[in-house]
Amino acid sequence: MFMFEKALAGSRRYWIWILVLLAVIAIGFVSYLRQLSFGLGITGMGRDVSWGLYIAQFTFLVGVAASAVMVVLPYYLYDYALFSKITILGEFLAISAVAMCGLFIFVDMGQPSRILNVLLYPTPASMMFWDLVALSGYLVLNAVITLVTLSAERKSVAPPAWIKPIILVSIPWAISIHTVTAFLYNGLPGRSFWLTALLAPRFLASAFASGPALLILLCMIMRKLTRFDAGREPIQKLALIVMYALGAHLFFVLMEVFTVFYSGIPEQIQHFHYLFLGLDGHAALVPWTWVSVVLTPVALCLLIWHRTRKDEKVLAFVCVLVCLSLWIDKGIDLIVGGFVPSPLGAVTEYAPTLPEVAITLGIWAFGFLTLTVFYKITLSVRATLEG
């Protein structure tokens, strides 16, 4: 396999991390076998809330995958050499994120045969079909790009000329995967919470904040645990991208809040009441919502103030705040909030079950395992070249 032998050599700390991830994956897989046997009734989802923790992770991770364009576009299209060390790291992050997206869809569909129905009986009128096409195509594009560019780097030669058109195609494709994901939701006229033309721009803005924030954290972790150093300046440029994207996201959210409450449409206001204040005595998501509401402007202010942005210890903390706030807003609040109340006015609260959480953690562990292997191969190749 492609330089896989480089992932088989590592320190004791490296193998402990691998074994921990494998253990979490094993627990998640056993929980999935239980779900496969019993059915989706083992989860906290039901008739009124049919999408939950799985689709929340899917929505967040599609944004992480799409955000790779924020390093790919400057480096490949404008020869921005400052991102030379981190571009392939962003692409590998996108591959791992798309793989997790596929697994979350897989476990959410219930019986695996339902996935085959999408493939065997394609329905161009269905947004689910186009989402599958967009994600699988993006996965193939990034796999080819990383394979070719890393092979060229290992041989100390320039990448072949034919890879440039593929890279150019991957840039708008990255935008498309999150746009199509937004269409999955706002194409459902019965769900007024998602029925907004701002959903796709809001998705992209939050993606371009959360993805680079996660990449900054990964670069800092690698600097601490390995001899790889992405450099201070690239990290600061990524921090600027996070700042602008988070500002755009906050602006879009405020536009949504103004439109809903100024128009006074009851069906839309009820969803916001449930998230911010609770509805009919049900308020499970209120604390989560307010955590996101507080963290987003705090993180933005810390990013705008150049002294805190340039302090990498503070920047790491800010990136954690960004990822957490957007994971809540775009995952739990967006998905569950769209189902409560139902179109008939029923308020049915959702809480994930233990098997559901175990499966979710197992998929995240699989994503981190693939990312660890990809990064280990990349750093080993670069260490060999430097040696």
Image (tube, rainbow, N blue to C red):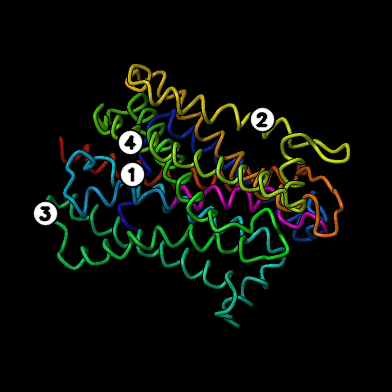
The residue beneath circle 3 is 157
| Nearest-to-viewer mark from 2 and 1 | 2
Q: Which residues are magenta?
A: 47-65
Above or below: residue 131 compared with residue 198: below
Give how far apart the Cα atoms at labels 1 and 3 are: 19 Å
58 drawn magenta: yes
What distance separates the C-alpha of mark 1 from that of mark 4?
13 Å
The disc label shown at residue 290, or none = 2
- Residue at image mark 1: 89
Say what secondary structure mark 3 lies in. loop
Q: Nearer the N terminus, badge 1 or badge 4?
A: 1
For marks 1 and 4, give the one nearer the viewer: 4
Q: Is residue 223 above or below residue 40?
A: above
Q: Is residue 46 left or right of residue 276?
A: right
**Contact flag, marks 3 and 2 (Cβ < 8 Å):** no
- SS assignment at label 1: helix
Q: Residues within 10 Å of mark 1 (few under 14, many from 20)?
A: many
The circle on residue 194 is none
Locate residue 372 relative to residue 341 in the image: left or right: left
Which three-letter amino acid code belongs to the residue tagged 4? Answer: Leu
Mark 4: few/some/many CA within 10 Å (<14, 14-19, 20+):
many
Q: Amino acid at mark 1?
A: Leu
Helix, strand or loop at disc 2?
Answer: helix
